[in-house]
């Protein structure tokens, strides 16, 4: 996996990262020196630190980096790397559409569900989940990323199957080594897979602006609201309306960074038409108001974690 030189200009789009791809998956090896301007993206990213040192900054916090560190980023949150000294990072990026289609089944795996959804959305994490692997698991995950990169270079349907399979194996290995959420108090309603939960997820994500309530969502699926809430919470780790709030916040973050739409219009687009309510809910997820989030993402981050006037156009 060769080193890459990548320009960061505020927002990275999956349409540019996965051009004409059979499957929206990308792997890369990046050498970072100095400061990398703050940026965000509309896809999910997992980064593994291989060597060197630096600091990773988000809207919520900053943390030093060292070999073995892992960063999981949901779509939306802005982040940057600062004070980098020969920092080498290997990353895996993939479109969220995979998690709604080809890999939808992994949502029923508790460890992977926590890695990609529960950990980043835990209180104070603002869409970013960071932890450190021991040497054995770090080596294993890097090896699996190498296999994934090799599979992504093949053409044809077998190549697609190979990429999806290796991505699933990588996520499973990484999830097994990540800090886990407390086990649910009851597994009575948590079979290995259930189409009801995935159907509810598809309904919510396909129409964020809908005035959803537990009763309305349950009626669409022809079940009781109580049963749906229990099933959804056991599988996803959040009740349906909390999941919807997170999906709305992530969609709003992408719109704030990728468009010049007024903040109020962004809120209405994702289902929060009251500007004050939109601001409160967005702040709950990202730690910043929508206006402050947009302003923070428009400039690189300084070494102290606050938006700054760093070196524009710096490449990794």
Image (spheres, helix red, strand yellow):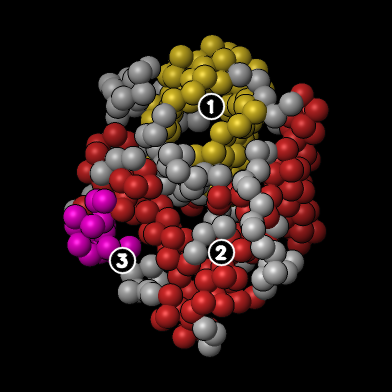
Q: Which residue is mark 2?
A: 233
Q: In the picture shown, does residue 297 fall above or below 193?
A: above
Q: Secondary structure at mark 1?
A: loop
Q: Nearer the viewer, mark 1 or mark 3?
A: 3
Q: Please provide the residue range marked out in magenta.
A: 265-280
Q: Residues within 10 Å of mark 1 (few under 14, many from 20)?
A: some
Q: Which residue is mark 1?
A: 5
Upstream in sequence: badge 1 or badge 3: 1
| Dominant secondary structure (helix, strand or loop) of the stretch shown in magenta | helix
User: Which mark, residue 271?
Assistant: 3
Q: Nearer the viewer, mark 3 or mark 2?
A: 2
Q: Is residue 155 left or right of residue 123?
A: right
Upstream in sequence: badge 3 or badge 2: 2
| Nearer to us in this view, 159 or 310 | 310
Q: In the picture shown, does residue 116 fall above or below 100?
A: above
Residue 132 appears in the picture as rendered: yes
Residue 312 appears in the picture as rendered: no
Label 3 and label 2: CA atoms lie apart by: 22 Å
Q: Residue at x 61, y 19 (%)?
A: 66
Q: Residue at x 38, y 47 (%)?
A: 285
Q: In the picture shown, does residue 223 fall above or below 47?
A: below
Label 1 and label 3: CA atoms lie apart by: 38 Å
Label 2 and label 1: CA atoms lie apart by: 42 Å
Task: Give the x, y percent position of residue 166.
Answer: 76, 49
Q: Is residue 153 left or right of residue 10?
A: right
- State how many labels appear: 3
Q: In the picture shown, does residue 278 fall above or below 306?
A: below
Residue at the top extreme?
A: 85
To which quarter of the image does residue 138 belong?
top right
Was residue 276 drawn as part of the magenta stretch in this picture?
A: yes
């Amino acid at each position: 996996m060769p080193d890459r030189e990548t320009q960061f200009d505020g927002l990275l789009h999956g349409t540019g990262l996965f051009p004409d791809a059979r499957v929206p998956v990308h792997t890369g090896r990046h050498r970072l020196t100095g400061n990398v301007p703050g940026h965000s993206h509309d896809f999910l990213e997992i980064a593994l630190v291989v060597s060197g040192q630096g600091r990773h900054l988000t809207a919520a916090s900053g943390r030093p980096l060292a070999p073995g560190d892992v960063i999981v980023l949901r779509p939306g949150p802005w982040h940057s790397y600062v004070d980098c000294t020969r920092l080498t990072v290997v990353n895996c990026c993939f479109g969220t559409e995979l998690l709604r289609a080809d890999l939808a089944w992994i949502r029923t795996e508790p460890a992977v569900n926590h890695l990609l959804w529960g950990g980043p959305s835990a209180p104070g994490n603002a869409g970013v989940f960071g932890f450190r692997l021991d040497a054995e698991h770090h080596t294993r995950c890097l090896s699996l990323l190498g296999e994934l990169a090799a599979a992504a270079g093949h053409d044809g349907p077998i190549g697609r199957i190979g990429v999806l399979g290796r991505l699933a194996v990588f996520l499973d290995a990484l999830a097994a080594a990540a800090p886990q959420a407390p086990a649910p108090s009851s597994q009575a309603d948590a079979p290995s897979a259930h189409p009801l939960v995935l159907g509810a997820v598809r309904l919510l994500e396909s129409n964020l602006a809908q005035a959803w309530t537990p009763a309305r969502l349950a009626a669409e699926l022809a079940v009781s609201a109580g049963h749906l809430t229990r099933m959804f919470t056991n599988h996803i780790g959040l009740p349906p309306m909390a999941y919807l709030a997170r999906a709305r916040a992530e969609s709003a973050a992408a719109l704030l960074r990728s468009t010049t739409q007024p903040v109020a219009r962004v809120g209405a687009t994702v289902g929060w038409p009251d500007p004050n309510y939109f601001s409160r809910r967005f702040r709950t997820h990202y730690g910043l108001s929508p206006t402050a989030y947009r302003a923070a993402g428009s400039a690189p981050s300084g070494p102290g974690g606050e938006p700054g006037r760093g070196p524009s156009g710096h490449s990794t």
